[in-house]
Image: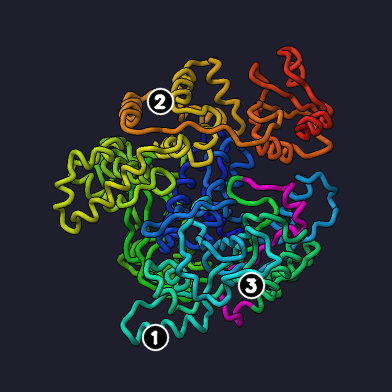
Amino acid sequence: MSAEHASNMSDLPELPASSTEARKQHAEISERIRSYNEAYHVNDDPLVSDATYDALFNRLIELESHYPTLKKNSPTQDVGAAPAEGFAKVKHARPMLSLGNAFSREDIVDFLARIRRFLNLTAHSPVEVVGEPKIDGLSLSLRYENRKLVTAATRGDGSEGEDVTANVAHIDDIPKTLPDDAPDVVEIRGEVYMARSAFQKLNATQAETGGKTFANPRNAAAGSLRQLDPSISAKRPLRFFAYSFGELSESLAQTQWDFLHKVEGWGFVTNPLTRLLHDADDIIAFYDELGTQRPDLDYDIDGIVYKVNDFELQLRLGFVSRSPRWAIAHKFPAEKARTRLNAIEVQVGRTGALTPVARLEPVTVGGVVVSNATLHNRDEIERLGVRVGDMVVIQRAGDVIPQVVEVIRDERPEDTTEYQFPDTCPKCGSHAMREEGEAVTRCTGGLICPAQAVERLKHFVSRNAFDIDGLGAKNVEAFFELGWLKSPGDIFRLESDHGDAIRKLEGWGDKSAAKLFDGVNERRTIGLDRFIYALGIRQIGQATAKLLARHYGSLGEWRSAMVAANEADSEALRELINIDQIGPGVAKDLIEFMAEDHNREVLDDLQDLLTITDVEAPTVSDNPVNGKTVVFTGKLELFSRNEAKVKAESLGAKVAGSVSAKTDYLVAGPGAGSKLKKAEELGVTVLDEQGWLDLIAAE
């Protein structure tokens, strides 16, 4: 582990000693990560440094390695954030995913080892990878049909992005047509960026003409590509590196290396520093070499991406919810600067979490002017010993606002005093308490706390939930203050109850009101997974909401099951906990949510106002395991447990953690024990590994 990474990890609270403490720490870090994702991917206004983000993200992964049930409700399964308002939305034919991070040689060795374990390879089996500079820009997907460019879309939330087709027309690196040998459908993916030299010229021109100057090339590229007026984008010097693909109507190559050479022949630009690497020594040597070259490049990079070269192995490795197993980003160290901490303000989140925010004397770090940083919690303030007025060291990596990493005590003003973390909520005055084993301090006001109430409403309309055009955070706050929004159902009564009043508000009018009401009405029909996520149940992130929706199928079934699961030792409780990677902690939060009268009233109200669509069965051809429940046990030899699970789910099967009367197949390897015995008692079909392979190969 690098010194930088070790420092970042030491800034975190200690690893918890129990599953209860782990769940609490995981929930607190998850809440912070999601707010950072929204700021970075949607608003181009990052809140914390890459180093801070990466340390927090890796703590989630660390917790999930000890307590796997935490994974399905985690931001580690999310990608980016949803597309911004003002752009048409494009559904990606194949998701655009994020990457896991590495910081050290040990992380790289572990990455290669995980690949070998998943593929059941020996510890010394060669794994060839392609190393590509990680461009600090904006991800873009280009779709060609019949060899003509038809759509250009940003990554967005990974499933749905922004349509910026008109804005890429003048980017010379993007061919508008492909040669005759290209397939009928091709999606080429890569990074839009702005060269450093072009960025400096743009900022000089902007300053001369009184226009907006940009903090760094990444922000300039993002701001230029995401212009609602394409004529502005056309004037900006944008470039594009191609590095991967999405949907293809036929294969282009057998390896990543050959793919890059193929698309070069079509007129795309690929990064000339890309290298074919054979082992960990190759990888580290390339990392060191590129780190030395980095300051002299005419574009910003913040690391290197390593991808398994063989596409057949990539296919076998597959994906976790958030990222591919066959790729990882190796990050470069953070940059540092000194500045004055002018104030500490406390914000209150949706779950009542009190988060201290440092207000800094603006300072330039790596070309970015920054003035804010989260201080995370009471422990972080005490660990740093930071006081208002202190001179502090901050660090950033990439293009985000930094974390405070050190207090320069020799320069502390004489009149500073120790910071006293509040014991009451700054918004409602309720007692603020910190439960044993939990890092975060929370307001106990619950629904009487206006900050919590308004943050829950913001979550309900957020982009990964109901995603209502025209109802952003500021409007939610305004309508809440006016008394028009108190519960989620009020959103869908805004037009009937307050339509005329909204049109007369300052800054509104017929056009903006119509946009809001159209946005609300478009979301009167919504999928079950988005609906569950929008409710803001503690520990229920997007991935867990999708898991629940898929398992129960309909809102009625899910509600009934959660109510029934409230009875100890009930079949409904066993079924809930038996869902792969959902355990007692998540089950407890779900059951407690449904047991609250207020929450049931909210659900009843929403059911009267909305159409919540059932989950469609997976569209898998006549495979005999589609819709079946499968359990794997014993020491599998023909494939790893993870690979078996991924394959089963891709065929529409449900993978459970234990055998029950609802289990259709038990796949038993050597050494199978209690699960095999129970399956035999229940009459469950038992298969060996080859029997399973024969079954899923059947048509």
Examine the structure image and report whether residue 62 is included in the region drawn in magenta. no
Identify the residue shown where x is 77% and y is 51%: 313
Q: Please name whichever residue, 594 or 389, is drawn nearer the observer in this view of the structure.
A: 594
Quickly name the residue at label 3. Answer: 268
- In this orientation, which residue lies closer to the viewer: 49 or 8? 49
Quarter of the view holding residue 579: top right
Upstream in the sequence, badge 3 or badge 2? 3
Q: Secondary structure at mark 2?
A: helix
Q: In which quadrant is the C terminus drawn?
A: top right
Q: Which residue is mark 2?
A: 594
Amino acid identity at mark 1 = Thr
Q: CA distance from mark 3 to mark 2?
A: 53 Å
- Which SS class for mark 1? helix
In the picture provided, is 558 more to the left or to the right than 650?
A: left
Which residue reaches farthest top? 681
Cβ–Cβ below 8 Å for labels 1 and 2? no
Q: The disc labelled 3 sits on which kind of residue?
A: Phe
Task: Please provide the residue range marked out in magenta.
Answer: 294-320
Measuring from the top left, give residue 275's x and y in whole percent: 74, 70
Which of label 1 and label 2 is nearer to you? 1
Measuring from the top left, give residue 106's x and y in whole percent.
71, 57
Real-space Cα distance between discs 1 and 3? 29 Å
Q: Which mark is residue 205?
A: 1
Q: Is residue 603 above or below residue 568?
A: below
Left-right relation of 659 to 176: right
How crowded is the residue under tag 1: few (<14 C-alpha within 10 Å), some, or many (20+)?
some
Magenta residue check for 304: yes
For residue 350, say whether it is visible: yes
User: Residue at point 44% right, 76% down?
Assistant: 234
Q: Position of residue 45 (x, y in %)?
A: 41, 63
The local crowd at label 2, few if under 14, some if 14 to 19, many if 20 or more residues have their Cα within 10 Å, is: many
